[in-house]
Amino acid sequence: MRNWRIAILLLALFLFSPPGQAQDFRGSIVGEIVDATGARVPSAKIVARSTHTSFERETTSDAHGEFRLEDLPPGPYHLTVTASGFAEATSDVSVVVSSVQDVSVTLRPASLQQSVTVQGQSSSITTEPIDITSAVHGGAVTPQDLATIPLAHRTFANIAFLVPGTEPVEPSDPTKARITAVSFGGSSGLNDVLSVDGGDNSDDYIGGFLQNFSPDAIQEFAVQSSQQNADTGRTVGGSVEITTKRGTDEWHGEGAFLERAAALNARFPIENPAPLPKQPFSSQDYSATLGGPIVKHKLWFFTSFEYQHENASIGYSPASLTQFNALASIATDGLIPGVNSIAVPNNVPVPFRDAMGSARIDWSQSNRSQWFLRTSEDNYTANNFAVQQGTLPSTGADWHSNYLNMVISNLFSFSPTWLGSFVFDASGLHLTEVRNSDYGFALAFPFSATSQTISGYETFGDNQFVTPITAFPVLRNQEKYQFRYDVTHATGDHNPHFGVDFIHEPVLSGALSGTAETLITYPNDPAFYAANPSQFYFSSQCATAPSDPAITCTHTPQSNGSFSQDIQRLGLYAEDFWRVTPHLTIDPGIRYDTTWGLFTGSGQTQSQNPAYLTLQALQIPLINGAPHDDRGQIAPRLGIAYSPGSSESTVIRAGIGLYFDDLAQNGWVTALQAVNTVPGRCTVVSNVPTGSGCLPGGAEGSIIAPGYKTPYALHASAGVEHAFNESWLMSADWTHEEGNHGFRRYQYEAGYTLTTPLIPTSDPNYRADQQAVVPNLQIFRSDNRSRYDSLTIHLQGNVTRHVNLIVNYTLSRADTWGCVLAELFDYVNGVCNPLNPFGPGDYGPSGEDVTHRAVVAGVFHLPGGFEASTLSQFESARPFTMTTPVDVNGLGDTVDDRAVINGVQTSLDEFRGTPYIQADARIMRPFKINERYTFMPYIEMFNLFNRNNPGANYVTNLAALPTPVNNLANATALCMNPPACTTMQPITSLNQLRVAAGGLGDFFGPGTTVGIPFAAQIGARLTF
């Protein structure tokens, strides 16, 4: 309640000042006024009036005959130009979000006809106009695109791939499984920033987008892939800026229905081949919108609602069923105490229910002041969540996520040239997870792991949501309040823009599983142990040592799994769009960001972390203090746009800038969790640390190292764009992004890479004595580096009046440091050897490194009133790393090492999966019922040619290969007659080890880079 009272008080203070709306979800009109001779006309009056509302903006041309209208809500406008001695000129202009519409106005003497020339149309991205004033790389997706392009899984992010410089990635968090992420610069999709109606909508726990919005509620959105403006902060990747639909003076709305069923879907041959029964599936989607006037010309409303009712399932492959049945026989033989039998289904139901609603009220207080209030909610549940193709239902969970968002905004015109803008944004998330089983243990076999698995890798038992890669909580709460105010001064030559962006996040909390757990990881699959029961190991608390050293048994005692933070973020920015000449625009900008409370968990700093106290007591000089918030986030930016000649049909762009982004909290959440209680003292007695503040020998500790530097990326770009005519436009852009201070996880093992000098090396039991008193430790350091380079070709236009088309091609390379999984920028990559963190083989392509990528999208107007559209994607194979469960590096860790093949250890992401090719299509036939109503039935088809697209989802563990290798420590041959292995086939090519695995999208929601098999859905939409 206290936080809400503070928020209301601050809001009230702002309401007594003349505020306005954030610029990043507005558009602009710029231009010049000339007479018939080409001479500039100063002091001309320009008025832009919204076609559907009473919103109006006016300005006057300067001494050079130039004008600029800023912060215009997207939509159609009627433009009127008047000047003394000239006839009035009028035209209709469409304003696109985060874009600049260039207008050239020629005034005729009062007795002659006037003209207004608009340099392009903006009804769709396929006819988006050329912008000669901006150095930003990106594009806008309009309502026509959302209505006509096939949209998989009803998430707005899918259609962002129309914009060059983007690529799909799997959802990186099961709490947001249906919000498809967007990758910028070869990254994981976690370093993006999303704003909706000017309000922050980013997830500060794991990164990426927070709340999903129905596509029917979205007016349009802009995607910026590089060289974002200074008002866009806290991103080292790209940004997506959404503006929602609003009411107008005309009643309007729509209703739609979509139906999918198993009969309309093809099999996924990897996991559900014939003759197994086809896995069940059905999905229905209902959506409706309504908008109109409450008081004409004054007050309007708009509301939307969408509900998805899906009954999906996980189908098991014959290979998985074989292993499950072998595990069931092990249980039947009594080798798993307390478990006498294990049910093995052919498939597992995964029901999903999602309800999204949004309501917006717009108020025109006057021609100078415009207000709106929007509230949105997304509430979904999922059962058997996190079950994947290689795991049994016991590893799943029931999830319930509830997202809330509210934005209050106002746009105030102090004068024709001075604008104030204000946004108050409040958002919240509450997530709960209840797992399907509570055995107190989990069994993990190699066949359950896939190349990208970061959750649910246990085959049977409790899903602990804690793996060597990351940690997923069983409870999450996020409460965020944002106050943003900026001011724009629009003149002919200069357009300075400055503002402040403050975020108060009193609640960023949750809990990891805190129950006592035992995780047993096996180097061989269940079939091996069913044939060799004497080699099967089980211990409820790792009380005994396994006979096979490759079997690891890790017991985690009961603990308080909670974590909590109270964070404040402040951003200050200033920028000027300086039109030096009618053909040259220079865009200097600077942004400063800082954070308070980033390293404080539950009110405690890392200096109170038991790991830190233990290191100090043991005199291990690994950590010499606690990290502090970085105050050096100064980000200058410079963009240049030059249009040679007089036709304004060509623009040359260049830019350079720095972009900072604090790391999302899930990467180091275990360190924040470690300080959730005040520790006691930690002292050493006879070389043994004692006291409640100490970690005992063999325990797991986690800590953030001092010397923190906020991750940042250097963006440098250059490109050229040319409009051949009103129908065709082409661009070529080069982009370089260099990441610095990315976080990495250093895993230290007691007795191997972490030792205390209190025990002399002359000790005959040196390693054992070290392990008895020294804990294992993971330390997070901000020292990673990465690089991304790309060349993007973009072509758009109207082939004929019946065909609109865009084609994108990107040639790129993304590299970073990592161990077995590599992502760019603010992702926490691992370190293979903490004593040599930049070792050989540790630098390689990121998981989203795509050398070649092409996108073809278009709308085709066919005979008979039919329309067809397509979104087709083609990209080269993504990389993955082959690992082994054997400690081939001799570092004592339980994390898989990179595999050794023929005596040579493989390098990071050395393997490549399968090229991704997927064509989606929609066929529709609008029927005009009368002047106002249109009924449109349609069918959408995804993966039209039913191509098998496993992507990079391949078997990544030598022990999980269906044809086993002869030696997990050094594979030289494949065993053709296991387990005897008397007949072997030498490994002469790494391609012999490439075996496609199950689909990652099974447990994170619909896959994007894995690719679903052919699926069709039928639907109908009524609009008025």
Image (spheres, rainbow, N blue to C red):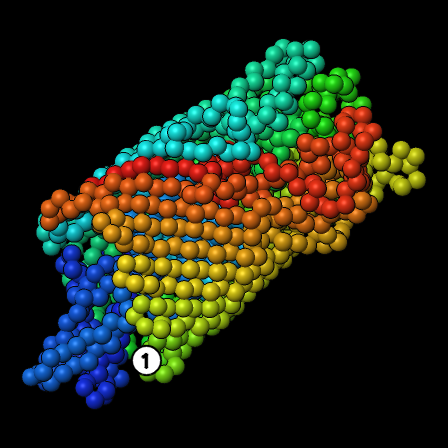
728 relative to 216, above or below:
below
Instruction: Give the image location of residue 57, x and y in percent.
Output: 19, 66
Q: Quadrant of residue 118?
A: bottom left
At x 38%, y 59%, the residue is 806
726 relative to 175, above or below:
below
Q: Quadrant of residue 180?
A: top left
Please identify the residue farthest to the left as the structure is shown: 111
407 relative to 123, above or below:
above
At x 10%, y 51%, the residue is 296
Instruction: Give the image location of residue 1, x and y in percent.
Output: 35, 37
Q: Quadrant of residue 415?
A: bottom left
Q: Does residue 547 appear left or right of residue 293 in this picture?
A: right
The front one of 974 and 85 is 974
Res. 196 in view: no
Q: Amino acid at mark 1?
A: Ser
**Quadrant of the drawing holding the C terminus:** top left
Res. 165 in view: yes
Instruction: Give the image location of residue 233, x and y in percent.
Output: 44, 58
At x 85%, y 36%, the residue is 767
Q: Which residue is mark 1?
A: 647
Q: Is label 1 in a helix, a strand or a loop?
A: loop
At x 29%, y 37%, the residue is 1019
Instruction: Give the image location of residue 19, x and y in percent.
Output: 26, 59
The front one of 766 and 322 is 322
The front one of 602 and 111 is 111
Q: How many marks?
A: 1
The residue carrying pointer 1 sits among few (fewer than 14), some (14 to 19) or many (20 or more) residues within 10 Å by Cα, namely few
Q: Does residue 158 appear left or right of residue 595 in this picture?
A: left
